Image: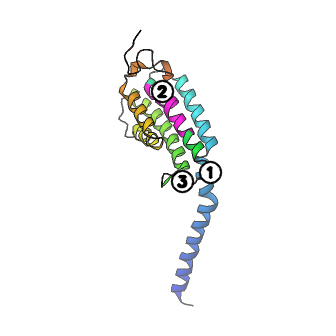
Amino acid sequence: MNPAFWNILAVALSGAFVLYVFKVWYAPIADWWASESRLLKKELRFCELIERTRNLPDYIGNQRAFIFRNLIVPWIRAIMARHRYERTFSGKVSVRAARRDVIRYMRIVAAQSTDAFLNRSSTADPEIIEDALAELNGPEAVSELKRVRDLSALDFTDCGFAIKAGHDGEADNS
């Protein structure tokens, strides 16, 4: 037989093997990595991290904690509820991609607080993910995110649970 035939056969079989490995190994791992249950576990751990580090020098800032607890978590849960049984929504974005972005967001915010304490520059920007999730949830979410970002970090209670009274961007009438 012709040696070129064997080369073509080897390439075809190796391509088939790669597709098989992707289908059998990678796809289930990717589904697990961005699964709803894993996201919920990560959210719980991240909230515990915010609580644990609130008195430490590398704590996650009150404003970031507020944005996560009061904006990001409800937004991703609304996205998951609306599009639970769809593969994609808004044209090309998948629910799995949105969950993956939230997991990345938590990692970026935690790393950024440590980098700030160690006086290192951080290249990742969590605001990009915040903006994307806000846009997926509509114009009200975008305006709410802008309103919260315009507030000072001192306007938030400890661990970012709420905005202090009289500091919600409106005049305090009391």
The answer to whether residue 153 is left or right of residue 8 is left
Q: Which residue is mark 3?
A: 88
**For numbered disc 1, what is the local secondary structure?**
loop
Residue assigned mark 1: 85
Q: Residue placed at 48% from the left, 39% from the top?
A: 105
Question: Mark 2, residues whose alpha carbon is within 10 Å: few (<14), some, or many (≥20)?
Answer: many
In the image, the segment drawn in magenta is 63-77
Name the secondary structure under disc 3.
strand
Neighbours of disc 3 within 10 Å: few (<14), some (14-19), many (20+):
some
The residue at the far front in this view is 173
Q: How far apart in space, not on screen, are marks 3 and 2 (Cα)?
A: 29 Å
Element at label 2: helix
- Image coordinates of residue 69 in percent, x first then y, are 52, 29
In the image, residue 69 sits, relative to residue 173, either above or below, namely below
Q: Name the spot of residue 27 as percent of width and height, x first.
A: 60, 57
Q: Is residue 66 above or below residue 154?
A: below
In the image, what residue occupies the spot 45% across and 41% down?
138
Residue at image location 41% in from the left, 28% down from the top: 148
* Residue 55 visible in image: no
- Mark number for residue 66? 2
Magenta includes 65? yes
Please name the residue shown 54% across and 54% down the image.
88
User: Disc 1 residue type?
Assistant: Tyr
